[in-house]
Image (cartoon, rainbow, N blue to C red):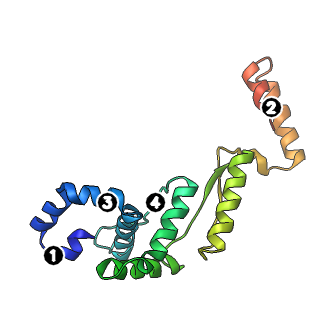
């Protein structure tokens, strides 16, 4: 953002390394988030696929924890209402980027634990509600593909597996948890 607005790389380097700038970025709420989302948007604008300047197939943002992620989206979406000038223009641009479904796909990731599932549900509700960003999918991490089997298929697999590993405490542990 600084480099884009100053035009001179020498001047931008001086500003970015100054104590005043470092203090400002720590004090002004949302400035770090705006800079980060701006960079993601810039990478997305460059395009993807083999013809793109950077040759990205896909840009993946492993976002921070739910609360921080939601706050980042809220700040980026409303930043233009807090300031004027170049930062307000940047805020408007980011709000447009985050509002355009063709710009990004959100895919929350959770584990199948009660607290994590509750948090994923809350995240999806907040994304779809005030932020108007519908998640494209939900990934359940650390799950067994066997969860999708029918009871009959599971019983057959269980019997075959149990016969192969009889007497193993580790195998018993696995078999008892389906």
| Residue closest to the eye, 176 or 74 | 74
The answer for how far apart the CA atoms under marks 2 and 1 are is 63 Å
Disc 4 to disc 2: CB gap under 8 Å:
no
Q: Quick one: label 1, few (<14), some, or many (20+) residues within 10 Å?
A: few
Compared with 141, 95 (above or below) is: below
* Disc on res. 61: 4
168 left or right, relative to 18? right
Disc with the residue nearer the chain's start (2 vs 1): 1
Disc with the residue nearer the chain's start (1 vs 3): 1
Question: For the residues carrying marks 4 and 2, which lies nearer the camera in this image?
Answer: 4
Q: Is residue 49 visible?
A: no
Element type at mark 3? helix
Q: Quick one: label 3, few (<14), some, or many (20+) residues within 10 Å?
A: some
Disc 1 to disc 3: CB gap under 8 Å:
no
Residue 27 falls in which quadrant of the image?
bottom left
* Disc on res. 175: 2
Tell me residue 36's x, y (percent).
37, 63
């Amino acid at each position: 953002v600084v480099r884009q607005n100053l035009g001179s790389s020498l001047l931008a380097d001086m500003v970015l390394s100054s104590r005043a700038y470092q203090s400002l970025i720590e004090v002004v709420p949302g400035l770090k988030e705006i800079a980060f989302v701006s960079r993601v948007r810039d990478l997305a604008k460059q395009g993807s696929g083999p013809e793109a300047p950077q040759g990205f197939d896909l840009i993946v943002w492993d976002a921070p924890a739910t609360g921080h992620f939601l706050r980042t989206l809220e700040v980026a979406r409303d930043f233009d209402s807090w300031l004027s000038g170049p930062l307000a223009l940047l805020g408007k641009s980011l709000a447009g980027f985050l509002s355009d479904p063709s710009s990004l796909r959100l895919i929350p990731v959770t584990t199948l634990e009660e607290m994590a599932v509750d948090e994923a549900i809350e995240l999806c509700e907040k994304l779809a509600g005030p932020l108007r960003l519908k998640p494209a999918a939900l990934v359940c991490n650390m799950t067994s593909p066997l969860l999708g089997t029918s009871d009959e298929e599971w019983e057959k697999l269980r019997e075959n597996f149990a016969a192969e590993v009889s007497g193993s405490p580790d195998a018993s542990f696995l078999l008892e948890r389906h």
